[in-house]
Amino acid sequence: IRIIGEGTPLFVQGYFDYDSKKAGSVTVSHLRIGPRPIRAPYRIQRPTLVAVHHWDALERRDPLAALERGGILLLNSPWSPAETWRRLPERQRLRIRQLELRVWQIDAARLAHEAGMGGRINTVMQVAFFAVSGVLPQREALAAITASIRQAYGRQGEAVVAMNLRAVTASLDQLQPLDW
């Protein structure tokens, strides 16, 4: 949200729901982006994009419950597209069909690990978000993400920056549509 708010003429707002326990808890981020100032300090009721960063959230919650018809679902999944579809709970497969969702998947955990980042999937999921949302043209989004990585991790050394940049490059190649 910072990348968009600082690097574009768009207005942004983030509203975050945090679980009361820290370890293993869920954070739901309600992000609004638009051409006019946003004054909506409450949860989004009808999202157009839902990103599920951890597969088990699909089993513990129903992140598709309020998703808009024709919306986008972005999944962090370790499986092939066919296997991902098979492993989705039946009620969610039905909902995807009913709402005619565009579904994308990426194995963020594997890509982060291969880039040397351990389990830190935020960079991979950020790239995937920009790729599927269309908020910014791809070239602009990648330039903004790269600049943000250099700013955020520069003090930690070039090795940390390089890990994140490797993850950015790999992410675009590994983002796949889920054909249902």
Image (cartoon, rainbow, N blue to C red):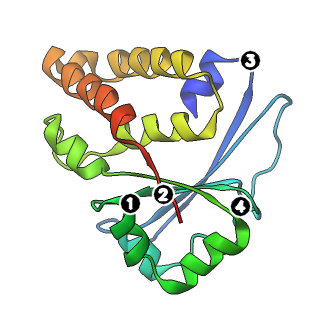
**Residue 140 found in image quarter:** top right
* Lower sequence index among marks 3 and 4: 3
**Residue at 44% of width from left, 71% of height from top?**
20
Q: Position of residue 112 (x, y in %)?
A: 23, 42
Label 1 close to label 2 by CB (< 8 Å): yes
**Depth check: 166 or 79 in front?**
79
Distance from disc 4 to disc 2, alpha carbons, whole Å, reads 27 Å
* Lower sequence index among marks 3 and 2: 3
- Disc number at residue 9? 3
Q: Position of residue 100 (x, y in %)?
A: 69, 64
- Disc number at residue 81? 1
- Disc number at residue 178? 2
Secondary structure of the residue carrying numbered label 4: loop
* Lower sequence index among marks 4 and 1: 4
In-image side of 30 versus 35 (left or right): left
Distance from disc 3 to disc 4, alpha carbons, whole Å, reads 23 Å
In-image side of 145 versus 170 (left or right): right
Q: Is residue 25 visible?
A: no
**Depth check: 94 or 7 in front?**
94
Label 1 neighbour load within 10 Å: few <14, some 14-19, many 20+: some
* Lower sequence index among marks 3 and 1: 3
Q: Position of residue 107 (x, y in %)?
A: 30, 51
